Amino acid sequence: MAAALVFRLHDKAPELLRDVLLERGWEEYDGGEREEEDWNLYWRSSAFHSSQYHSLLPWQRLNHHPKTVGITRKDCLARNLRRMRASCGSTLYDFSPSSFILPNDYTRFLAEYDKLHLTRGASLYWICKPVDLSRGRGIFLFQDIKDLVYDCSVIVQRYVSDPLLISGYKFDLRIYVCVKSFHPLTVYIHQEGLVRFATEKFSLSSLGNLFAHLTNSSINKLGPFYRAEKESVGRGCKWTMSKFRHFLRSQDVDELPLWQRISNIVTLTLLSIAPSVPSCPNCLELFGFDILVDVGLKPWLLEVNCSPALTLDCPADVSVKRGLISDLIDLMNYTSTDGLRDGAFQKQKHKRSCFRRPSYDPRSSQTQTLPLLKTVPQSKGTNPGRRALVADQSRRLPPVNPTTACAAGVRIINSTARKTHRDQTLNLILGSHSRTNRHTRPGETDVSQKTPEIRQRGPGFKPSAVAWKLPNIYSGSRVPVTAPLVETTASTGRGVPPVRVGDFIRTFPFNAATLKASRHKLNVKVVVQELHKLTGQLTSGQCDEAEGTKAGEEDFDSLLWGPKDPPSLRRCFKPT
Ligand code: ADP
């Protein structure tokens, strides 16, 4: 029988995560009692060291993909979006306020400032944010360049000065996005999220009042009106997304275009880094996208958080975050075979049968599936229907890539090829100037030489560290390996990830063309075209019949993320 699944938390990992996992019958990793590798989920708030990706075993998952800093640091995000705007056009990539990274972009900023001040005069506002701080720390607003003072790397951004207000209060939306895989790109957005309010009324005549201009709860919690009953907003500074949806309906707002535009922002932002993120199918990451909506209902991307806060400060947090974590665990798609990790240590036979799939054809994207044996206990108080989909799923096993098949003890690769592969992998993670790129000097440790240490478990068991290493799990390559953990829906059986897992709605791929475009090497151009087309169809409410019902598309259903009871994407527009 499979043992309980085991989680490992790094300091500062959220308490709520521990609670949810324990409720679901998981056990917490205890280094004193368990072997180093005897866990299924390792959760850190900060990034993992590159060596931790290399030593991942098949039953293990990490909560961060490697190299996603390209969207989670303000300056990197600004740079990547600028690059995408230049290559894909500013029509789609018009969702982020123009930004300048100072001191480097100072001359560009000055030119833009002078140009805009000639035409817009005093009605122009800027916001300055330190690039690597969060929670509103170090942020200030200014109009006149003489008030721009900074002593670290900052980003100066056009301030969205006409935000949509609720009873005079500014707010932004915290959208929870789970990237299940970068290769192929597989994205889910949670139906629940948070609306975060400023706690004093918005006014452009008080730029120094952060309680009126910033929506961070870490700031507003400290404000004098946090506990006060505020018109429409209520006490505190947060609503759930459900309450916001209800509010939009009560105002007769046509909400569908807003949700679709936000979903587009998520996809387009992820596209900016997807081709450069190394393939690591055993990783999954929850991002917090911060979106500001202006009076014209246009959503603006403010930033992307790599470890969105999962602390519980108020009732809205409780009702959103508990379900969110539970759904996230379901997305990780553990099966009872993951609980067999202990036996696998003792029986190399098991290890082989798990990871060497003789019938795997490297030229095909098909991987083998195992019937699901999952009996993970349900968490209390969750919707019983929400897990039905998971119970339907079967799990894909890691394909054995013949060039890296040493995982299964199949030593096809020759040592030179392996070294080249390993070096390329490390260069991608650590950068080409990394220490591993040089020859190791006496006394220096070359991390690329390190293989994970597998301690001996039972009498007579002498695992080969190389055999235990699974390079096919973490290829580090820009040429993706097929993700072993992407489920097949019972309905399609064509490698289409489930349309919904709990309250996570799949937003990418959203049709057969984007599935195809992301399956091997991500074709950004095709994806951008498809997004363009979809947005046009949703705006006009119509689609070309030939487009909507292409052969093979009948069984590819997608939902429109956002509205209550999300409708099928295909039903959002009628054929012309
Ligand atoms: P942090 O990482 O410190 O939270 P953000 O970029 O999220 O930094 O900014 C903090 C807050 O400042 C946001 O939640 C939002 O309320 C406000 N803000 C940031 N950038 C802008 C902008 N360009 N226009 C309007 N408001 C902004």
Image (cartoon, rainbow, N blue to C red):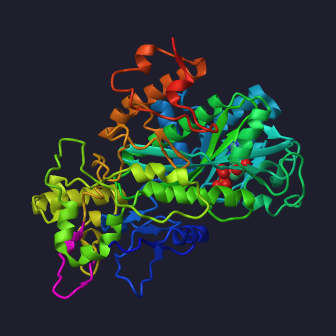
- In the image, what residue occupies the spot 24% across and 50% down? 368
Query: Depth check: 498 or 36 in front?
Result: 498
Is 204 left or right of 116, judged from the image as shown? Answer: right
How many numbered dots are placed on residues in this image? 0
Q: Residue furthest front?
A: 384
The relative height of residue 540 versus residue 473 in the rendered view (above or below) is: above
- In the image, what residue occupies the spot 62% across and 58% down? 321
Q: Is residue 145 magenta?
A: no
Please provide percent x and percent y for residue 101. 59, 47
Is 378 left or right of 429, judged from the image as shown? Answer: right
The relative height of residue 155 versus residue 356 in the rendered view (above or below) is: above
Span of residues in magenta = 453-469
Is residue 172 at least partly visible in the picture?
yes
Q: Residue furthest top?
A: 576
Please provide percent x and percent y for residue 525. 39, 29
Is 69 left or right of 194, judged from the image as shown? Answer: left
- In the image, what residue occupies the spot 39% across and 47% down? 182
The relative height of residue 545 versus residue 491 in the rendered view (above or below) is: above
Please provide percent x and percent y for residue 173. 68, 46
Q: Main secondary structure of the magenta part?
A: loop
- In the image, what residue occupies the spot 79% across and 58% down? 220
Classify the position of the N terminus by image quarter. Answer: bottom left
- Residue 422, picture quadrant: bottom left
- Residue 414, picture quadrant: bottom left
Query: Depth check: 262 or 494 in front?
Result: 494
Please provide percent x and percent y for residue 354. 22, 63
Is 304 left or right of 318, judged from the image as shown? Answer: left
Q: Is residue 459 magenta?
A: yes
Query: Depth check: 550 or 233 in front?
Result: 550
Is residue 163 at least partly visible in the picture?
no
